[in-house]
Amino acid sequence: MKRPSIRIIVLQWTNKHLSERQSLILQSFVVGLLSGLAAVILKNLVHYTHELLTNHFTISRSNLLLLAYPFIGMILTVLFVKYIIKEDIGHGVSKILYAISRGRGRLKRHNTWSSMVASTLTVSFGGSVGLEAPIVLTGSSIGSNIGRYFGLNRRSMVLLIGCGAAGAVAGIFKAPIAGVVFALEILMLDLTMASLIPLLIAAVTAAVLDHFFMGENVLFYYSLTEPFLLKNIPWYLVLGAFTGMVSVYFTRANQKIEAWFGTIDNPYKKLIYGGLALGGLIYLFPPLFGEGYMALKSILTGNGADLTNNSFFYAIRHDYWLFPGFLILILILKVVAMATTTGSGGIGGIFAPSLFMGGVSGFFVARMLNKLSFIDVPESNFTLAGMAGVMAGVMHAPLTAIFLIAEITSGYELFIPLIITATMSYITIMYFEPHSIYTKRLARRGELITHDKDKSALSMLKVDKLIETNFLTIELNATLGDLVKVIEQSERNVFPVIDRNDIFCGVVFLNDIRHIVFKRELYETTLVKELLYMPDVLVEKNETMEEVAQKFHSCQHYNLPVLDQGKYCGFVSRANLFSAYRKIIHEFSEE
């Protein structure tokens, strides 16, 4: 007799000894443990590789290796993705949102490790991106595959994806609250007790693991040294507006540069252009190397002039006006370097670049304000608030930004300025960009899930899954007699009319021809094309279900023809749509 597999044994044990809720809590703990461990491995690996590559550099002059390192990293990444993974693994958070919206919570098994390897190759060698999106994809994939292993339904699978994301963020920053808020705000999970407890368990588990295994030099943290003063509130509002505009630039420039790289069909040409451009930028502006957290630490510790280390600009480190100009160049070029990295084949996210640009923005604003004799604002506090501002604007996630910076600083003394700056930045960018950098692609294709359950349910439905094909067709040049034969075989009262190339020409309603259907003398002389009616509302196969629902709302028809570039595919019915919609709403609401 064949022995049962380990999976069967595990499933039998959990079904026998644990309730569904207890099983989900245990699974969330395992997801948090594994995603936290992945964050520890990735962060340490990149940090020490970076140290090995750059610790021999001379501070006061540039180093030619800065020109070569990024290109080497890009080549290794592209070869790894092309010949080992053999599919696109970039834009990790967008992939998670797509899996939740359209993929029923399913992420591929290789996502549990592939983005970790690829981002290590990219960022260790200087790629100007972050590790957070790859590790969030890794954690979410761990959750998805554990859910699939236990045969969970879509709702539970999505919750474990959120647990993996929360654990990844909590593990890489030692910030459990920010991890939970990230899952709720970015992945758009519903805030219920049924979802909150597993998210908390996963996030805390990952953060505790981080305490044990993450080296002090690896973590990005800072202890506040300057108090928050009420008199500076107007200047935090100014910072919020400035970071909001920086966020607009960040989003639009990234989109345009990546789109330009997308027009290059040859991947090797794309790699050469991107690798050379990235190497040149980093050679001229070393702060663009890697994630940028070392540069932020220099600013926060009062050593902002160190941003000019290893560069041609070392001589202007203390210049009253030229150094702020250098900061502006850093702000402009960081997005170029980031988009060049991802556009030409590198793997990484926008999380760290948004924090870097926010920190530099806050530092710049504080420097410029302090040039006025009647203003004295703390540069370190403005740096931290700026980080929250750009992150809130770019990601459309003010709560995640606020709690992340609060946890990084080990306290909530800066809570009010963080709220002011993040909120002002969010309000500013919402005027220009209604969707975040993560959701923009999905929103354009109508595949974005939202907290609005109506829109979420409709976004998960596809026209081609609801097409009814049991409507018998009739040829355009057929006679009434031919139509009567079709009517005898049909159970429907609507008959689509098509030509010889299957092009849709209209419909014939049985009620419209009932008065002549028994007049045999008309069978050979009356043609179908004389009887047809062209509906005033048609549906294209590639339309979103939200558009289809709107069409049903605006007309009285119970069935609408579905076409694919003019060719007849079938009908979608109001009743079928409503039934599918109710089923998904039930899944959302199930506790």
Image (cartoon, rainbow, N blue to C red):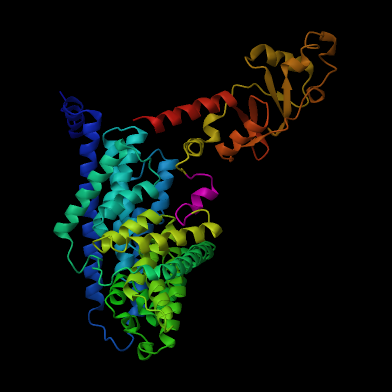
In the image, taking residue 127 as reference, residue 214 lies left or right, namely left
Q: Quadrant of residue 134?
A: bottom left
Tell me the quadrant of the picture where the C terminus can be found: top left
Q: Is residue 254 magenta?
A: no
127 and 499: which is toward the camera: 127
Q: Is residue 441 magenta?
A: yes
Q: Is residue 122 left or right of residue 445?
A: left
Q: Is residue 404 above or below residue 63?
A: above
Q: Is residue 299 visible?
A: yes
- Residue name at image x 78 percent, y 8 percent: 518
Residue at 72 percent across and 20 percent down: it is: 509
Q: x%, y% of residue 286?
A: 35, 79
Vertical comparison of 313 with 126: above or below = below
Q: Is 110 displayed left or right of 206 in the figure?
A: right
Identify whether 176 is placed above or below 455. Answer: below
The percent coordinates of residue 203 (x first, y second) are: 25, 49
Residue 510 in the image: above or below residue 166: above
What secondary structure characterizes most of the magenta part?
Answer: loop
Q: Position of residue 180 (x, y in %)?
A: 30, 48
Q: How many marks?
A: 0
Residue 533: image quadrant is top right
Q: Is residue 75 visible?
A: no
Residue 489 position by quadrant: top right
The spot of residue 224 in percent (x, y) is 25, 69
Q: Which residues are magenta?
A: 436-448
Quick one: quadrant of the N terminus? top left
Residue 82 vs residue 536, the one in the foreground: 536
